[in-house]
Amino acid sequence: MTVEASEPSTPTQTRPFISIVMPCLNESASVATCVSKATGWLARSGYQGEVVVVDNGSTDGSPELASQAGARVVFEPVRGYGSALRRGFREAKGDWLVMGDCDDTYEFGDLDALVAPLDSGADMSIGNRFAGGIAPGAMTWSHRYIGTPAISLLLRVFTGLRVGDSQCGLRAFTRDALDRLALNTDGMELASEMILKAARRGLVVADIPVPYAERLGEAKLNTFRDGWRHLRFLVLASPNYLFTVPGVLFTVLGLIILIAAIPSSRIEVGSWTWQPVFAGSIFVVVGINALMLGFASRLYTSAVGLTNEDALMRFYKRYLSLEFFVVGGIVLIATGFVLDVVLLIVDPGELNIGIAAIAQTLIVVGANAGLVGALTSLLDDRR
């Protein structure tokens, strides 16, 4: 249902049309209340707008109740918080969009503070329940003190964007911001996807205190499943932290161990003997593989819009071609074989384990370089 404003705020300026989108799954206890509050706010605020309820498979009559209360109801057959919201965004007509759960935890009757930053030039505003006040019993201690702060911290580390409550479901944003976000996740991780992409696209994000009440009806959030989905998304969307940083650490550690092992391939302490050369070889191989996979994953995440094409990506694309990896791999493999031959000819009776380990490491890394080069070329061609 579209709600007409009683009168515009100024006679010379047309205020934006606002779509309030609510995902819904068996919320018969609260959906009508939320819709009524939202339509009431639209009527009082001077904004033209609509309330869109996206039913995600309710069996308790929620769609009918929402429609009777004044919402336009659309249906999304694919289950998931993200699926429902993305359907709602596609169906919405608004220049600005507001999203929020229809379980009566958020105050749809007063959205002035939430949308005000958009009027001042912000691209998105995100509610902060910790600053606005959490009612007793509205949030479990694990979500309040562990889950939400942990995800918020990861987002700050991965993006640099400081958001006080990264999991608050009450948000407002412009149509242009929505188009730039290009959202594609289906579950609760959509909340993190919005923030991560907003930061990487340079959107202006406002942090707005909002109250949070105890919900009506049954909670849909699964702590471990949905927490894992957030963590999985954030890690996979941050290849530098998943691959590059560990790759550098393993490579440096492996090289130090290999160099130290060349004079003596074993360390003896009393009856205890350790041959560090093997650990060094393993660390180098794992580290170099992680670095090459980091390169491949950067190409992929850039292609699907999770990371921006920065200076590092431009360097990758300019210099790290299939030919570079193939030629580099051949050189490494050839060097490893030469070292093996030299060891065989010069001192076949007393094989230097350190040099032999370096030779085998070069052969393995060289072979992997050729394979990763082929993979990255396939990804780059797809771009």
Image (cartoon, rainbow, N blue to C red):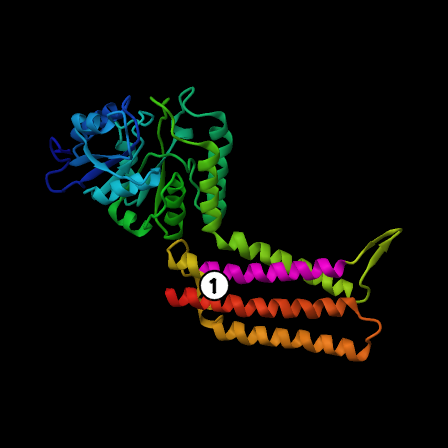
Report x, y in % for residue 244.
55, 57
> The disc labelled 1 sits on which kind of residue?
Leu
Report x, y in % for residue 121.
28, 45
Task: Note whether residue 252 is visible.
Answer: no
> Does 172 appear above or below 267?
above
Report x, y in % for residue 163.
42, 40
> Does 41 appear above or below 297?
above
**Seen from this angle, which residue lies furthest bottom?**
345
Side of 331 where 351 appears, left or right: right
Report x, y in % for residue 253.
68, 58
Side of 128 where 355 appears, left or right: right
Side of 150 where 23 appears, left or right: left
Residue for point 32% across, 27% down? 106
Q: Would you identify the image quadrant in which residue 250 lies? A: bottom right
- Majority secondary structure of magenta residues: helix
For the C terminus, the image quarter is bottom left
**From which residue to which does the magenta span run?**
276-298
Task: Note whether residue 193 is visible.
Answer: yes
Residue 264 inside the magenta-drawn segment: no
How many neighbours does mark 1 have within 10 angstroms: few (below 14), some (14-19), or many (20 or more)?
few
Identify the residue position indicated by label 1 in the image.
Answer: 312
Q: Secondary structure at mark 1?
A: helix
Residue 278 inside the magenta-drawn segment: yes
Q: Would you identify the image quadrant in which residue 302 lies? A: bottom left
Residue for point 63% across, 67% down? 364
Q: Would you identify the image quadrant in which residue 38 lies? A: top left
Residue for point 28% across, 30% down? 58
Q: Nearer the viewer, residue 118 or 360?
A: 360
For the N terminus, the image quarter is top left
Q: Nearer the viewer, residue 194 or 327?
A: 327
